[in-house]
Amino acid sequence: MVMPGHRESNLQKALNRYIPTAAAFGGVCIGALTVLANFIGAIGPRTGSLLSVTIIYHYFETFEKEKASELSFFGF
């Protein structure tokens, strides 16, 4: 990966400065949309449940990817 104006050795440091902020902002936006949709009933009464299932599924996918990468690392 190349980022203009940054050396390859400093790339991780530069990305660590932006990624947590972007992730937090995205979480706040999704949370605000969920709260707003619940108040006006736009999506239905189960918006919180839908968001919870989506988050849990994301954690499951992440866990499976990490497990697969560890298995491939050890040669199984």
Image (tube, rainbow, N blue to C red):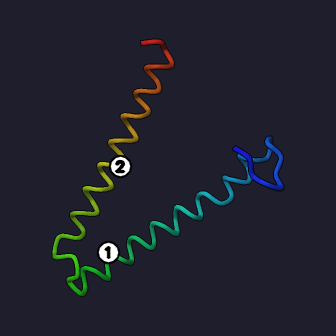
Please name the amino acid that badge 1 sits on.
Thr
Whole-percent x and y of residue 11?
Answer: 75, 47
- Please give left or right for residue 20 compared with residue 44 in the image: right
Q: Which residue is mark 2?
A: 58
Whole-percent x and y of residue 51?
Answer: 28, 63
- Please give left or right for residue 30 compared with residue 48 in the image: right
What's the residue at 38%, 37% (across, down)?
Answer: 63
What's the residue at 83%, 55% (across, down)?
Answer: 5
Mark sitting on residue 42: none
Secondary structure under the numbered disc 2 in the rendered image: helix
Q: Which residue is mark 1?
A: 34
What's the residue at 46%, 19% (across, down)?
Answer: 72
Tag 1: Cα neighbours inside 10 Å, few (<14), some, or many (≥20)?
some
Please name the amino acid that badge 2 sits on.
His
In the image, residue 16 above or below residue 32: above
- Please give left or right for residue 35 compared with residue 72 in the image: left
In the image, residue 71 above or below residue 20: above
- Which quadrant would residue 8 be assigned to in this image? top right
Tag 2: Cα neighbours inside 10 Å, few (<14), some, or many (≥20)?
few
N-term mark: 1 or 2: 1
Image quarter in which the N terminus is found: top right
